[in-house]
């Protein structure tokens, strides 16, 4: 792979086959960018435009032998119109104050407060999934990297931290890396996961950017189906972006 930001070609490596995290009884592979390759926001911006994502410092894309159901998607924020239910979600969360915390400048108290919220969220939502006992190191390894332009957007109500949207800033948009929020109690009915996407779309539009990258859309995976509610989406398959989902025959 070559890039206008690279001085030499970039090597890619195929992972060993492993159980799919999203679709039962399927095997998966990932295509990883060489972890020794020079990486920065410009290079990553080009890669995300080609369907790659990051997990920590690792940049990858699904590359399965018998399945092509993991489809990168992005929301065109300038054309995004809220549905009635999304407007209700926005209206009931108008009292939330959002502030940006730059990873490189974050003070230890903020980092600890965020980590405690992350622990509560993981224990509530991902029990027995290999993530249910995170350490501070594993938390930072998962969400940050030394080369990405990453911001932790804090959502607060009456100075109480109730959600964090971890977001990468790329050249043409924002990339929603991960969101965690208060899993129970008074905020359970506030639809904070939905609100975080609405807010990130609004923030991308405010910055004059075109896209909110939302990761992978997977036909037949219920926990990924929420992305259909944000339109207009573009879908990356056959090496380019499309305004409609791929035909079902793509993975056959």
Image: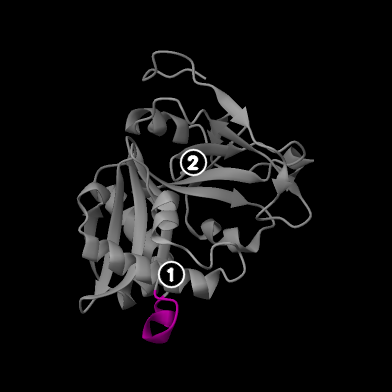
Q: Quadrant of residue 158?
A: bottom left
Q: Residue at x 53, y 71 (%)?
A: 125
Q: Residue at x 79, y 55 (%)?
A: 25
Callout 2 environment at 10 Å: few (<14), some (14 to 19), or many (20+)? many
Question: Which residue is found at the position 36% from the left and 20% from the top?
Answer: 5
Whether residue 188 appears in magenta in the rendering, the answer is yes
The earlier-in-sequence mark between 2 and 1 is: 2
Residue 130: x percent and y percent?
Answer: 59, 62
Viewer-side residue, 31 vs 105: 105
44 sits left or right of 161 in the view: right
Please provide percent x and percent y for residue 124.
51, 75
| Tag 1 secondary structure | helix
**Residue that carries the numbered disc 2 in the rendered image:** 53
Q: Residue furthest top?
A: 8
Displayed quadrant of residue 120: bottom left
Vertical placement of residue 25 versus 223, above or below: above
Which residue sits at x=37%, y=63%? 196
Q: Horizontal and vertical percent for residue 133?
A: 51, 67
Query: Which residue matches tag 1?
Result: 119
Q: Residue 170, relative to residue 158: is it above or below?
A: above
Q: Quadrant of the C terminus?
A: top right
The segment highlighted magenta reads 182-190
Could you say where residue 109 lies in the image, as x and y percent from the top left? 22, 65
Q: Secondary structure at mark 2?
A: strand
Q: Nearer the viewer, residue 150 or 73?
A: 150
Q: State the residue in front, 55 or 165.
A: 55
Identity of the residue furthest to the bottom in this view? 186
């Amino acid at each position: 792979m070559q890039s206008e930001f690279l001085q030499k070609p970039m090597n890619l490596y195929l992972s060993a086959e492993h159980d799919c995290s999203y679709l039962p009884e399927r095997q998966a592979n990932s295509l990883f960018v060489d972890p020794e390759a020079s990486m920065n926001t410009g290079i990553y911006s080009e890669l995300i435009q080609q369907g790659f994502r990051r997990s920590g410092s690792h940049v990858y894309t699904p590359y399965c032998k018998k399945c092509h159901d993991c489809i990168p998607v992005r929301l065109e924020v300038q054309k995004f119109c809220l549905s009635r239910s999304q407007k209700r979600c926005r209206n009931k969360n108008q009292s939330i104050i959002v502030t940006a915390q730059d990873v490189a400048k974050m003070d230890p108290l903020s980092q600890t407060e965020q980590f405690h919220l992350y622990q509560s969220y993981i224990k509530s939502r991902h029990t027995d999934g290999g993530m249910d006992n995170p350490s501070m190191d594993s938390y930072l390894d998962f969400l940050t990297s030394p080369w990405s332009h990453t911001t932790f957007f804090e959502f607060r109500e009456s100075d109480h931290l109730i959600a964090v949207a971890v977001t990468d800033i790329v050249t043409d948009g924002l990339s929603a890396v991960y969101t965690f929020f208060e899993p129970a109690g008074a905020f359970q009915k506030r639809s904070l996961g939905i609100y975080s996407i609405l807010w990130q779309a609004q923030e991308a539009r405010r910055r004059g950017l075109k896209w909110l990258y939302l990761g992978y859309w997977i036909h037949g995976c219920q926990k990924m189906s929420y992305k259909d509610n944000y339109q207009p989406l573009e879908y990356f398959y056959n090496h380019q972006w499309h305004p409609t989902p791929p035909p079902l025959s793509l993975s056959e």
